[in-house]
């Protein structure tokens, strides 16, 4: 399992509290990776060629008691963001391998 390679990665990383209230009619990510204040969300898109995945990464911060998101990263968050991308990448490939064994690079 991929998670064994990434100690400290939360398997079921929570999405920001209150985000579900705003996103009731919107789709939710199929997977989330949370490393400290950095969160990567994996989105699944069904196409005529099969499932495709996209990843968004944000930095969580608290301002006046309210949690917010930013797509900007400082020096100290860059490697954490890279690790979140890598973990999301590994998760996507495990999904692709289990869905259709032997898919090429063009499938993701």
Image: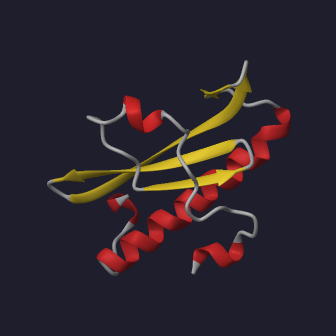
Q: Report the residue at 59% width, 65% height from top.
A: 11
| In the image: residue 93, left or right of residue 17 | left
- In front here: 77 or 8? 8
Residue 70: x and y, percent? 63, 26
- Is any atom of residue 63 visible in this view? yes
**Furthest-left residue in this view:** 48
- In front here: 56 or 107? 56
| In the image: residue 49, left or right of residue 5 | left
- In front here: 14 or 51? 14
Q: Is residue 5 above or below residue 58?
A: below
Residue 40: x and y, percent? 57, 47
- In front here: 42 or 62? 62
Q: Is residue 64 above or below residue 62?
A: above
Q: Quadrant of the rendered structure where residue 63 is?
A: top right
| In the image: residue 79, left or right of residue 49 | right
Q: Report the residue at 39% width, 77% height from top.
A: 97
Q: Is residue 91 above or below residue 1?
A: above
Residue 77: x and y, percent? 78, 39
Q: Is residue 55 above or below residue 62?
A: below
Q: Report the residue at 19% width, 58% height from top.
A: 49
Q: Quadrant of the rendered structure where residue 68 is?
A: top right
| In the image: residue 64, left or right of residue 108 | right
Q: Quadrant of the N terminus?
A: bottom right
Q: Report the residue at 41% width, 49% height from top.
A: 29
């Amino acid at each position: 399992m991929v998670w064994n390679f990434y100690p400290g990665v939360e398997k079921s990383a929570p999405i920001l509290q209150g985000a579900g209230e705003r996103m009731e009619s919107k789709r939710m990510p199929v997977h989330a990776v949370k490393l400290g204040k950095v969160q990567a969300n994996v989105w699944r898109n069904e196409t005529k060629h099969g499932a495709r995945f996209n990843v968004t990464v944000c930095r969580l911060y608290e301002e006046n008691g309210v949690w917010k998101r930013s797509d900007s990263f400082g020096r100290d968050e860059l490697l954490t963001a890279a690790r979140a991308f890598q973990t999301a990448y590994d998760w996507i490939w495990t999904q692709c391998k289990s869905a259709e064994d032997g898919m090429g690079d063009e499938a993701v």
